[in-house]
Image: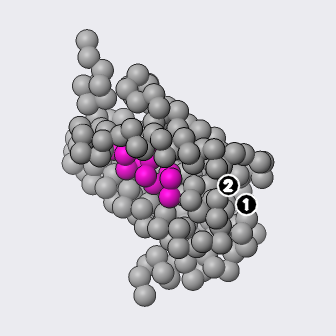
Amino acid sequence: MSETQDYMTRVARLDEAGKQTMAALLLVRYCSWHTDPKFQQWFGLARDALADATSAARAVLRGEATDLAGLRVVLGEALEACDPDGPPFEAEITDHLLFATEVFDFLLAPEETEALAQAFERADELADAHGDMAREELPDGHELATVDFEGMEADAREADSEVPLDRRAALQRSEEFADLYARVIGLSYSEEDAGISD
């Protein structure tokens, strides 16, 4: 049994709201890096889509109604506008938009647990890739050069599946992850990578 399958066995015990909470926390962890000022002028449509996705995730965590179907359309449009074979930074954007659409597919149909499993697998890929990014792009000795996103993700998932869940603590944990994740991305791309020229 794979790690994801084993994890999904435990997640299956959660009610619908619990599963949606876990999905929303994934969005907070991996899609909050759009606020880096370096990237503001480069990817307006994608930036706004990621911002809306994380805002919707927080609404889900608060139990508030939000237009998930409308936002899924916006994410799809932003994804279609990206070129996955383009410059490295555009590929970065594409990866995160694809991840966000998969999470939204689950939020719109929470009975489809296969979509949640796919989102977890994609999160594992992002955690692994950005841990490698930190090791390869940041100088030796940098405080983030050895950040263990994979381990942090595994710990967050385990804690997020607790019943009852302390949502405030879960959100804080995901926001701390998101801060480190955003810093690694921001430090790993130059202004030229982000489309900013003198």
The residue located at (45%, 54%) in the rendering is 99
Nearest the eye: 104 or 193: 104
Q: Which residues are magenta?
A: 92-102
Which residue is nearer to you in this view: 24 or 130? 24
* Residue under the point 37% across and 45% down: 94
- Three-letter residue code for mark 1: Asp
Secondary structure character of the magenta stretch overall: helix
Q: From mark 1 to mark 2, how far is it between C-alphas?
A: 5 Å
**Residue at disc 1, secondary structure:** loop
Query: Is 123 a magenta residue?
Result: no
Pointers 1 and 2 in contact (CB under 8 A)? yes
Q: Position of residue 188 (x, y in %)?
A: 29, 38
Answer left or right for 177 relative to 139: right
Considering every residue shown, the one lying at the far right of the view is 64
Q: Position of residue 51 (x, y in %)?
A: 55, 37
**Residue at the bottom extreme?**
1
Which residue is drawn at the image coordinates 33% and 44% (left, top)? Answer: 92
Rendered-image quadrant of the C terminus:
top left
Residue 167, picture quadrant = bottom right
Q: Quadrant of the N terminus?
A: bottom left
Depicted 79 relative to depicted 40: above or below: below
Residue 159 horizontal side relative to residue 186, left or right = right
Residue linked to disc 1: 166
Residue for badge 2? 169
Left or right, residue 130 beside residue 22: left
Secondary structure beneath label 2: helix
Other-residue count near label 2 (Cα within 10 Å), few / some / many at <14 / 14–19 / ≥20:
few
How many numbered callouts? Answer: 2
